[in-house]
Amino acid sequence: MALSDITVRMAKARDKQYKLSDAAGLHLLIKPNGNKYWRLKYRFAGKEKLLSIGLYPVIGLAEARERCLAAKKQLLENIDPSQSKKEERLKHLINTQNSLENIAVEWHNNKKQVWTEHHASNILRRLQADVFPALGSKAINDIKAPELLTVLRTIETRGAIDVAHRALQTCSQIFRYAVATGRAERDITGDLRGALKTRRKENYSHLKAKELPEFFEKLEQYNGELQTKLALKFLLFTFVRTGEVRGARWAEIDFEKKEWRIPPERMKMRDLHIVPLSEQALQILKKISLINSHTEHLFPNRNKPVTFISENTLLYAIYRMGYHSRKQFMDLELQLQLF
């Protein structure tokens, strides 16, 4: 006689395991600890076999019957349901191991050894925010170009066109890594060439040679914080990125050799960078030492002395000197927040 929901629900544990039969080989096995398991008895290739269907009440009676029917259809097609289940589990395990997120994290761990900590953190943060939620759990070889484009379009809708392009570049590197390690057939990002929006290219704002005297005069007249003024001057005489100037430490300065030795971990290319110091640069350093010789950094953050000034500090000083419109300044500030 076929089982009913109430019979299954009310079945109690006994000293020994026992089973309640339903129909077509389906039965419920009740263990002494009270656990209830759905099983299907069937024959394949002349041998009697058992298929585990699931644990009650996670799998109810109706669903157990549906799974039993699906197994019977496989038998009609000369497919062993137990072997098919093992193959599906193996496929799921492989897909999980070969998911976009797993491969991306593996790629990131390999690459971060040659990146700065800040750059490595940004790459992973963008993937976690924009790519993993939609595609992270999918096997990388199953991801199609239109699916990736949908993710990138979502980034575009925020107005973050440059971020979308960077995400595409990062995904391309991940796919190429997956191809090299035998877990993807091809880099699908090539199919998206030209699919993203592009910004109208504009030249970076810069000073012409004839404008430099006026800039130096305005810098001399700048009435903001002294260390900001000196940081801008030091930047002009060393020709490095603002990040290197802002993070400069006294331990990196060799006054005798007239050198500034920036360690690899603070450089984009992770190589030691030696900056020759001109007499003008050395004079600026002496002025800085009068106010900041007791700190680790040349240009410490006034609110958090263990850190250094922000890039916005320098940008705002230039803005106050009249070299950016309000809109240009806000655009630069937004880009810093995005990247």
Image (tube, rainbow, N blue to C red):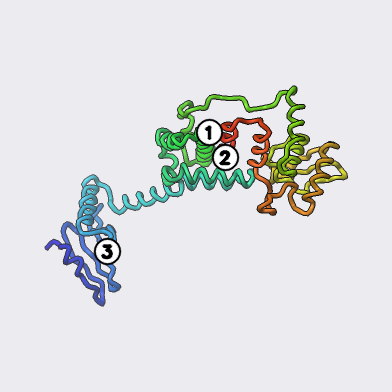
Q: Are marks 2 and 1 in contact (CB under 8 Å)?
A: yes
Q: Amino acid at mark 2?
A: Phe
- Number of labels in the image equals 3
Above or below, comparing residue 326 to residue 244 in the picture: above
Residue 326 falls in image quadrant: top right
Q: Position of residue 204 (x, y in %)?
A: 63, 27
Per the image, label 2 sits on a secondary structure element best described as loop
Per the image, label 3 sits on a secondary structure element best described as strand
How crowded is the residue under tag 1: few (<14 C-alpha within 10 Å), some, or many (20+)? some
Tell me the residue at 73%/29% (across/down).
215
**Outermost residue toward the right in this view:** 256
Q: Amino acid at mark 1?
A: Asp
Residue 219 falls in image quadrant: top right
Q: Position of residue 217 (x, y in %)?
A: 76, 31
Give the side of residue 217 with respect to residue 2, left or right.
right
Mark 3 or 2: the one toward you:
2
Judging by the rendered image, the residue that carries numbered circle 1 is: 162
- In the image, 78 versus 5, the foreground residue is 5
* Earlier residue among tags 2 and 1: 1
The alpha-carbon separation of the residues under discs 3 and 2 comes to 53 Å
The alpha-carbon separation of the residues under discs 2 and 1 comes to 9 Å
Q: Position of residue 94 (x, y in %)?
A: 43, 48
Give the side of residue 152 with respect to residue 257, left or right.
left
Mark 1 or 3: the one toward you:
1
Q: Amino acid at mark 3?
A: Tyr
